[in-house]
Amino acid sequence: MFIWVWLPLLVLLTVAVITDLRRRLIYDWLTLPGLLYFVGIHLFLGDLGLTQTLGGALGLGGICLLIAMASKGQLGGGDIKLFAMIGAAIGFTLGLQALMLTFILAACIAWPVLLLQKLKKSGAKRVDHLPMAPFIAVSTLILIGL
């Protein structure tokens, strides 16, 4: 299963992290084919089940959409689609754990950054938001054991 699921997921997450760090974008040409690939490969392999695969994609995508709406856009569309792709790859149960771990990891970085910004003078460059793809990738890789 490593060759068919984990290796493509690792490649897609790496590209998402690079594009998010460089351009603050996670592209549709990356996430949407990835989502379709993982749904298809799990149906072909018969390992994860249709409920976990589609539930992961729709469930995580839907939860992230609600988070984006509640946070007034702090979670972007690329992040939403990346989580939908991850849900299709690892299923709803593990995907939900990845979602929670993502926000815990992001908070561990954001709080010190915000604290340092408060202590610095107002003329210093402020960080308005962090790219989420690195946190999404790290949490997903932790949970799948890579």
Image: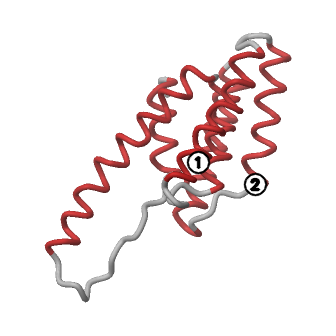
In terms of secondary structure, where does tag 1 sit? helix
The 10 Å Cα crowd at callout 1, few under 14, some 14 to 19, many 20 or more, is some
Q: Amino acid at mark 1?
A: Thr
- Please tell me whether residue 8 is drawn above or below residue 19 in the rendered image: above
Please give the residue where the numbered disc 1 appears in the rendered image: 14
Residue 33 position, x and y percent, is: 81, 43
Residue 86 position, x and y percent, is: 63, 35
- Please tell me whether residue 52 is drawn above or below residue 120 in the rendered image: above
How far apart are labels 1 and 2 at the CA level?
A: 15 Å
Q: Horizontal placement of 138 versus 22: left or right? A: left
Among the 4 quarters of the image, the one containing residue 49 = top right
Q: Residue at x 58, y 43 (%)?
A: 64
Q: 129 and 34: which one is in front? A: 129
Q: Residue at x 37, y 48 (%)?
A: 106
Q: Horizontal placement of 111 versus 93: left or right? A: left
In terms of secondary structure, where does tag 2 sit? helix
Q: Say the numbered circle drawn on residue 28.
A: 2
Q: Amino acid at mark 2?
A: Asp
Q: 141 and 88: which one is in front? A: 88
